[in-house]
C-alpha cells in the first residue's frame, strides 16, 4: 500500500487537543495517497496515513491497530502501525506467522512486529517505510527498506518527535521552524555528496537505508543497522555468475509485478530498462505497456556527449517491437518542462533538479493515466559498472570521488563564513572507512570495490530519490528490481575483473543476451535524457545573475558575488569546458542555485 505517513509523539502535550494539526500534517501527503486518508490520535501519540490503492493487493486499513477494536482514547493506546510502500514477500511472511491467506498486509506487519519485535523488518523484502508506536511501553520504531527506496524523515525535539514520509509533513507542524543548516552547504550545492541520514534542514534527519530508529521519550532516537553489504570470495565461474544474476533478476521482477491490473515499464532501449521490461513481458498474462520520453528540440539541438551519445526513442521503439509491448513515446516541449517545475518542487520538499525532474514527472504523469504500478531498470549502472568514468584510470586513481569530474564546484564560491574547508575530503574518508573490504583483495579489484561503494552512496540516492518523489507525487508506484538487496549483495562480490571484463556491464549483457535485441546489446551507454536547449541554458545563467544580485533573495550574501559572476560569464560565453557530475552541461551546473532559491522562498527557509 503506497501513499504517505506522518506521526507525532509528545509526552508533554495532549495530542487529542491537536487534531487539526495532525490532519494538516496528514493532508500534506495527499498527492502521494490520493485514494483515502485517516488518523489515529491518543493522548501522547498521533499517526496519520494517506492511501494509494494498488490493484490485486490485500490491503488493510491504516493506521492499523492492535487490538483491532482500539479507538481514540486518553491513555497511551494500543500498538499502532502505518507504512508506505510494498512488501514483495508478504505471502511468505504470512505463512511463517501461520496467518490465514486472507490476512491483510497490515495484519501481517502487526503480527510480525508483535512476534519478533524490532527485528521483524529483517524478514521483509520490499520498498517500505514503517512506523510503529507501541503504546504498551511508549516506544516508537521507524524503519526503512534495505536500499532506501521509500523515504522517512524525523525531527526530534525536547519531549517529542515528528516524522513523515516527506519534510512537508514535519513543516506543517508549527513546532518546527525550517532553517537551512549552514554547516551542510556542501550537500546543499552538491547533493551527490550527501551521507546517509543527512538533510539540509537543521534538525531534520532521514532514517538511513536498512536502519531502524528506536525512540523513547526518555532516551531519544537511537539508530541501528539491520542489514549491510558483506564482502566474501566469489565462488562462481563467469558462466555460473551470469546464470545466477539472471535467476536473481528474474525472481525480483516476478515478485514485484502486480498481482492483477495493468503494468507499465520505463523503456529507454538500453540494457537496464530493456532487461526488466523483457522479463516482465514474459511473466505477464497480458501485454506490457512501455514508455519513453523525448524532446521536441532534439532534432535541432541534440549533440552527442560521452554520457548521452544518442537519443532513446528509436532504441526504445525497437526494443518494444522485439518484446511485443504496447509502446508510447512522450514528446515534451521546453514549455511543458517549465510548466511542471513548480509541481516537481512540491513533490520533493527539498532543493530539486529543475528540468531533470520535470521530464520524469511528465513521463510518470502520462503512465499514471494507464496504471498505478510500473517497473524500472534504475540502479543497474551503480551495481554492474555502467558509467564511463569507471573506465578512466586517471579518475579512478584520484584520492577523491571519481564521479566529481574536474569542473568547478558551487561550494567553492561561498563566502568564507559559509565555506566548509575540507568537508569533501572528510566525506570521502568517511565513506572509504565504511567499505566492507575483502581480505586479500588487491589491485584494481580492490580499488573498484571502493569506487563502486562511493557511487552507491550519494549518487545512487540522488537517482533513487528523484524516481520515488516524481512517481509518488502522481500516485504511481515504481518498482526497481535491480534494488532487490539479495541481487545487490550477490553482484557486490563479483570481482570487477569479471563484472566488466568486456566493457560496461558486460556481465549483465551476458546474463540477458538471449532476450535482448541486437540494438540494445550493441548500444553505447546513454543516461536518462535531459533537454538540450540553448535558450534555456541562457535563461539559467541570467536567472542566477539576478538571484545573486537581488537583495531580496534568500541567497543574498551567501556567495562571493564577484567570483561567482566571473564563473557565470565563462558559462555564458562558452569558455567553461569541464567534465561535470552526471554529464551535465556547464549551464546545468546552475540548476541547484535556482532550485535552492525557490525552495527557500516556497518554504520560508532561513539560514541557521
Image (spheres, rainbow, N blue to C red):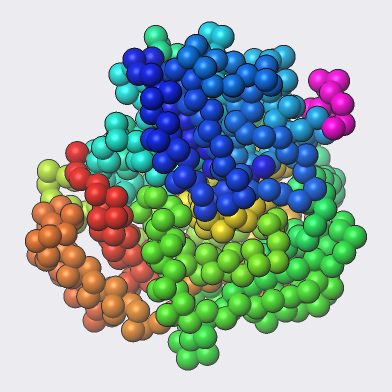
Compared to residue 578, the image places residue 138 above or below, namely: above
Compared to residue 508, the image places residue 322 above or below, namely: below
**Quadrant where the image shows the N terminus:** top right
Query: Residue at the spot x=29%, y=63% of the render?
Result: 594
Query: Residue at the spot x=9%, y=61% of the render?
Result: 551
Residue 178: in magenta span: no
The reply to whether residue 161 is in sight is: no
The reply to whether residue 415 is in sight is: yes
Position of 107 with respect to 10 (left or right) is right
Residue 114 in the image: state x and y as whole percent.
68, 15
Hey, which quadrant is residue 579 in on the image?
bottom left
**Quadrant where the image shows the C terminus:** top left
For the view shown, which residue lies furthest in the bottom direction? Answer: 300
For the view shown, which residue lies furthest in the right direction? Answer: 285
Give the camera-side residue of 538 and 459: 538
Query: Residue at the spot x=32%, y=72% of the render?
Result: 587
Residue 376 in the image: state x and y as whole percent.
67, 58
Position of 391 with respect to 18 (left or right) is right
Residue 531 in the image: state x and y as whole percent.
46, 76
Position of 288 with respect to 407 (left or right) is right
Hey, which quadrant is residue 237 in on the image?
top right
Give the camera-side residue of 26 and 453: 26
In the rendered structure, which segment of residues is drawn in magenta?
A: 92-102
Compared to residue 201, the image places residue 324 above or below, namely: below
Give the camera-side residue of 394 and 120: 120
Count the numbered circles shown: 0
Query: Residue at the spot x=16%, y=59% of the render?
Result: 553
Position of 311 with respect to 347 (left or right) is right
Amino acid at each position: 500500500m503506497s501513499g504517505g505517513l506522518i506521526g507525532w509523539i509528545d509526552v508533554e502535550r495532549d495530542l487529542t487537543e491537536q487534531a487539526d494539526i495532525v490532519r494538516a500534517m496528514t493532508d500534506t501527503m495527499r498527492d502521494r495517497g490520493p485514494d483515502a486518508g485517516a488518523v489515529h490520535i491518543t493522548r501522547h501519540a498521533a499517526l496519520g496515513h494517506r492511501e494509494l490503492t494498488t490493484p490485486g493487493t490485500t490491503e488493510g486499513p491504516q493506521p492499523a491497530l492492535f487490538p483491532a477494536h482500539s479507538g481514540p482514547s486518553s491513555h497511551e493506546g494500543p500498538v499502532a502501525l502505518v507504512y508506505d510502500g510494498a512488501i514483495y514477500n508478504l505471502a511468505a511472511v504470512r505463512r511463517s506467522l501461520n496467518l490465514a491467506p486472507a490476512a491483510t498486509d497490515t495484519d501481517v506487519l502487526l503480527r510480525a512486529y508483535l512476534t519478533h519485535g524490532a527485528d521483524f523488518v529483517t524478514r521483509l523484502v520490499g520498498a517500505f517505510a514503517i512506523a510503529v508506536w507501541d503504546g504498551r511501553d511508549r516506544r516508537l520504531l521507524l524503519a526503512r527498506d534495505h536500499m532506501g527506496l521509500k523515504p522517512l524523515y524525523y525531527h526530534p525535539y525536547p519531549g517529542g518527535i515528528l516524522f513523515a514520509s516527506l519534510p512537508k509533513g514535519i513543516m506543517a507542524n508549527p513546532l518546527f521552524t525550517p532553517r537551512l543548516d549552514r554547516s551542510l552547504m556542501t550537500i546543499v550545492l552538491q547533493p551527490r555528496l550527501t551521507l546517509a541520514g543527512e538533510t539540509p534542514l537543521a534538525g531534520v534527519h532521514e532514517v538511513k537505508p536498512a536502519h531502524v530508529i528506536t525512540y523513547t521519550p526518555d532516551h531519544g532516537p537511537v539508530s541501528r543497522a539491520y542489514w549491510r553489504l558483506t564482502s566474501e570470495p566469489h565462488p562462481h565461474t563467469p558462466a555460473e555468475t551470469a546464470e545466477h544474476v539472471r535467476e536473481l533478476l528474474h525472481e525480483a521482477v516476478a515478485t514485484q509485478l502486480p498481482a492483477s491490473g495493468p503494468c507499465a515499464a520505463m523503456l529507454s532501449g538500453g540494457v537496464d530498462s530493456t532487461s526488466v521490461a523483457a522479463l516482465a513481458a514474459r511473466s505477464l498474462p497480458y501485454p506490457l505497456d512501455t514508455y519513453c520520453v523525448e524532446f521536441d528540440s532534439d532534432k535541432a539541438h541534440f549533440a552527442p556527449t560521452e554520457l548521452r551519445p544518442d537519443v532513446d526513442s528509436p532504441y526504445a521503439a525497437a526494443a518494444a517491437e522485439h518484446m511485443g509491448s504496447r509502446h508510447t513515446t512522450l514528446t515534451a516541449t521546453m514549455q511543458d518542462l517549465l510548466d511542471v517545475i513548480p509541481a516537481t518542487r512540491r513533490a520533493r520538499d527539498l532543493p530539486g533538479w529543475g528540468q531533470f525532474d520535470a521530464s520524469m514527472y511528465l513521463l510518470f504523469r502520462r503512465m499514471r493515466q494507464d496504471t498505478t504500478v510500473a517497473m524500472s531498470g534504475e540502479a543497474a549502472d551503480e551495481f554492474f559498472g555502467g558509467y564511463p568514468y569507471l573506465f578512466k584510470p586517471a579518475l579512478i586513481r584520484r584520492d577523491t570521488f571519481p564521479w566529481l569530474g574536474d569542473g568547478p564546484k558551487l561550494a567553492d564560491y561561498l563566502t568564507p563564513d559559509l565555506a566548509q574547508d575540507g568537508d569533501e575530503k572528510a566525506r570521502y574518508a568517511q565513506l572509504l572507512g565504511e567499505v566492507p573490504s575483502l581480505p586479500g583483495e588487491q589491485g584494481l579489484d580492490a580499488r573498484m570495490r571502493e569506487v563502486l561503494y562511493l557511487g552507491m552512496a550519494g549518487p545512487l540516492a540522488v537517482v533513487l530519490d528523484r524516481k520515488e518523489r516524481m512517481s509518488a507525487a502522481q500516485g504511481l508506484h515504481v518498482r526497481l528490481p535491480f534494488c532487490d538487496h539479495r541481487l545487490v549483495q550477490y553482484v557486490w562480490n563479483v570481482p570487477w575483473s569479471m563484472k566488466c571484463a568486456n566493457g560496461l556491464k558486460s556481465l549483465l549483457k551476458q546474463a540477458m543476451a538471449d532476450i535482448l535485441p541486437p540494438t540494445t546489446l550493441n548500444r553505447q551507454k546513454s543516461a536518462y535524457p535531459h533537454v538540450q536547449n540553448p535558450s534555456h541554458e541562457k535563461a539559467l545563467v541570467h536567472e542566477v545573475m539576478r538571484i545573486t544580485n537581488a537583495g531580496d533573495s534568500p541567497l543574498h550574501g551567501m556567495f562571493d558575488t564577484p567570483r561567482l559572476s566571473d564563473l557565470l560569464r565563462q558559462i555564458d560565453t562558452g569558455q567553461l569546458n569541464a567534465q561535470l557530475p552526471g554529464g551535465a552541461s556547464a549551464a546545468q551546473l546552475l540548476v541547484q542555485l535556482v532550485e535552492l532559491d525557490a525552495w527557500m522562498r516556497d518554504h520560508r527557509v532561513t539560514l541557521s
